[in-house]
Image: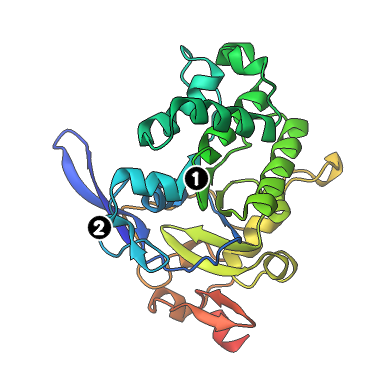
Amino acid sequence: MYREFQQRSGMMRTSRTVRAVDGVTFALPAGEVLGVVGESGCGKSTLARLIMGLLPPSAGEVRVDGRSLAGMDRRERARLIQPVFQDPYSSLNPRQRIRDIVGLPLAAQGDLPKARQVDRVMEMLARVGISSEMAERMPAQLSGGQRQRVAIARALVLHPRIVVCDEPTSALDVSVQAQILNLLAELRRELGLTYLFISHNLAVVEHIATEVAVMYLGRFVEHAPVQDLFRTPAHPYTQALLASVLTPDPDLGIPDVGLGDTYPDPANIPPGCRFHPRCPQAIDQCALTMPDNIRRHGRLVECLLAVTA
């Protein structure tokens, strides 16, 4: 799957093509959680919007049970896939009561009588830990964690099969993050949900995901079961990400992972392996040959070094 954007810059308004998602292909079994990690600007949120049908792909397609999302209308897509966004402060309408916010997807579908809609809303709010008294409040009267619970209830009120979580805990305190993660894990088990979970926080991904995809400049450079990836990372970029995690020991300081200070330009992809200008393990061939995804020990790794490893 591909997604390109045209970027204009400078006084002459020169146009450049940015391929935010570049040849990403994956299959996610029902009931599993795919965590997608990578630096800011690598294409994670664009991928999420493609999966939700908010952006059309420039090439390729998204399929659910063999059916293309492009062949579905908006209501059918909404019944299959729902999002939970990053910021619970901006994703809820500040002028609506909580019960009305959660009931909006049901009202848009128009399939249930009003009384049944109310029952479904209250049932889902109770499931996420929001009381009937809170249902009458406005979003400004709730804490950040409570707002995110409301956002989760709104996403699940249509009983979707897939939930796309785009940094759903990054705006919350650490203690509240744990509560929301435990709630998402519990709902997944109870309702048989499938998650696409996007996060910068590797500890969060390790906690909730069953598989992890590491994204760099629009591509998956490694895709593996969560325990395998965290125990034995195969791609140099994955190794650098894991080495960059801060520790509570002040004597250790900020880790130097050897990636340098230059941030990659998505509009100027280097030849060969796109990671080679920053890779501490690169060989001469890396600058010339674009590696294919190589299957190694049950995982996919886009690295020439994986051939000889």
Q: Position of residue 193 (x, y in %)?
A: 59, 53
The spot of residue 138 in percent (x, y) is 56, 12
Q: Earlier in the sequence, mark 1 or mark 2?
A: 1
Query: Which amino acid type is shown beneath numbered disc 1?
Result: Ser
- The answer to whether the residues at label 1 and label 2 have Cβ atoms under 8 Å apart is no
Q: Quadrant of the N terminus?
A: bottom left
Q: Nearer the viewer, residue 275 or 92?
A: 92
* Left or right side of 61 for 208: right
Out of 139 and 178, give the one closest to the viewer: 139
- Which amino acid lies under the numbered mark 2 shown in the image of this protein? Ser
Measured in 3D between alpha carbons, the distance from the residue under mark 1 to the one under mark 2, in whole angstroms, is 21 Å
Relative height, residue 288 to residue 64 (above, below): below
x, y percentage for residue 80?
44, 51
Residue that mark 2 sits on: 58
Q: Quadrant of residue 281?
A: bottom right
Element type at mark 2: loop
Name the residue rendered at 40%, 53% in the picture.
51
In this view, the residue in front, 165 or 74, is 74
Give the left or right position of residue 282, taking residue 247 as reference.
left
Q: Residue at x 59, y 88 (%)?
A: 308
Label 1 belongs to which residue? 40
